[in-house]
Amino acid sequence: MNKIQLDETICALATPAGIGAIGVIRVSGEQSIQIVNTLFRGKNLLEVPTHTLHFGKIMDGTELVDEVLVSVFKDTKSYTGENSIEISCHGSPYIQQRILSILVQAGARLAQPGEFTMRAFLNKKLDLSQAEAVADVIASHSEMSHKTAMNQMRGGFSKEISGLKERLVNFASLIELELDFSEEDVEFASRPELKDLVQNMLRLIHGLTETFKVGNAIKNGIPTVIAGKPNAGKSTLLNALVKEERAIVSAIAGTTRDTIEEAFVIDGIQFRLIDTAGIREHTSDSIESIGIEKTHEKIKQASIVLYVFDVNETSLAELANETAAMASMDLILIPIGNKIDLTQEAVIKQKFSARTDIIYLSSKEQSGIDKLATRLRKVIDSDQIKNDVIISNIRHYQSLMLAGESLQQVIESMEIGRSGELLAFDIRKAIFHLGEIVGDISTDDLLENIFSKFCIGK
């Protein structure tokens, strides 16, 4: 993204490219109403009230381009905080591009990705965390990711951060005031009160950062690997969960050579299922060997591993041996006893009675799938989902961690009796990192990195 130019009028297609019933072209900037008014035949847009809708024609000289509806937003009463127009035209790609072309000829320029939302941020209609949430709302793929993004866009996270920051600023001001009276040896900021405040803030920050794993999973989908020996029924289980023939199923061991990824949603939470090559110690097939290596890589990256085993061919000791390494990893291991339809269920459950964590099912008959879905739903801590504020952005997480480190340094400085000057320095560092989140502290490079990931027209 080039240097920010708020004095220019920008335009872009706000609806997806392609043929549709309608297309919406967004225009924003100080001259947006004047520019559109030169093309529009209907009411004089310069004289109409804000937040009004007008029918008319878009003309290219004397040639009719399209009949349109124009929405008018004046002054700060718009998404971007500046004069804006939205033109609803017919959904022909030719018409859309023709209107954009004559808007550019009339004095506008094509918007860059995320430029409308960047203007909303720069004009203080949104803070930076809310602006980032706009992209998350657009990209939301499940009920839970939508709710999380909407809460952040409406300022839920910003309120938490602003509250923390304000309390720190008050104490930092008092400590810095002490420095002006250093010769009098006065203390305006109560050290016990400051310590209590910092400790409370550390608890709050810790609580927020603890939600990141959940938030990131909600936002991107929970990486869930289906692993097990060849021919245990992994691909059949994938097909049963996504309710389509996504993976090739064969009685021949080693059919799956590469990973297959598919998503499915349970109660508003998306799980990213990854079917992998069967795990075995020795194979003469070099391609299958590469697939097994990929399986181990995916297991290391997973949040959940569904370890599928054939209840008829596997002993209790073998199951323990096969899952021993995974049990020590930072993941949730769910053993899946498959092919329960081939033997009496009571016999199988007696065989594995020492294990209470096994889900018994038949991927082929699709029985017991509901029990697995219930277990997966419980993977996300229900208390964290109920929280109003869940961290799902890695940038926010990193800034909170840095703020926490600075606050921990404040505690240590007070315990060893460091000067007020050093205390103030550490407090200011924490304030800086909190300010990074909401955009009080920002650079052109940071803004470019964030907004360049938006779609054009937003």
Image (tube, helix red, strand yellow):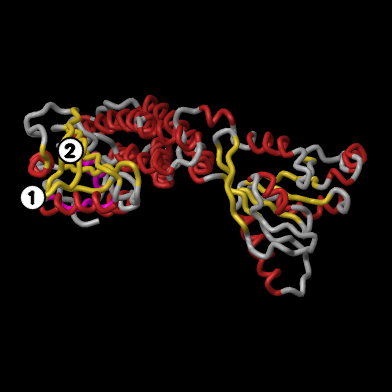
Vertical arrangement, residue 78 with respect to residue 339, above or below: above
Label 1: which secondary element: loop
Closest to the observer: 416 or 208? 208
Q: Name the residue under label 1.
A: 61
Looking at marks 1 and 2 on the same chain, the residue that comes earlier in the sequence is marked by 1
Q: Looking at the picture, how far across and down is residue 237, in whole percent?
A: 71, 48
Q: Residue at x 53, y 31 (%)?
A: 385
Badge 2 density bin: few <14, some 14–19, many ≥20, Cα 10 Å: many
Q: Looking at the picture, how far across and down is residue 63, in whole percent?
A: 12, 49
Closest to the observer: 254 or 279? 254
Q: Give the residue type at disc 1.
A: Gly
Q: Looking at the picture, how far across and down is residue 141, in whole percent?
A: 48, 41
Closest to the observer: 47 or 334? 47
Q: Quadrant of the C terminus?
A: top left
Residue 136 disc label:
none
Q: Looking at the picture, how far across and down is residue 308, in whole percent?
A: 75, 50
How far apart in space, not on screen, are marks 1 and 2 (Cα)?
Answer: 23 Å
Q: Quadrant of the N terminus?
A: bottom left
Badge 1 density bin: few <14, some 14–19, many ≥20, Cα 10 Å: few
The part of the image, by quadrant, that contains residue 14 is top left
- Left or right of residue 227, residue 86 in this image: left
Q: Residue at x 78, y 43 (%)?
A: 365
Q: Which residue is drawn at 20% across and 44% down?
A: 66
Instruction: Please say whether residue 116 is one of the residues in the magenta stretch.
Output: yes
Q: Residue at x 24, y 44 (%)?
A: 25
Q: Give the range drawn in magenta.
A: 108-122
Q: Mark 2 points at which residue?
A: 84
Labels in figure, total: 2
Vertical arrangement, residue 135 with respect to residue 50, above or below: below
The part of the image, by quadrant, that contains residue 181 is top left
Q: Give the residue type at disc 2.
A: Ser
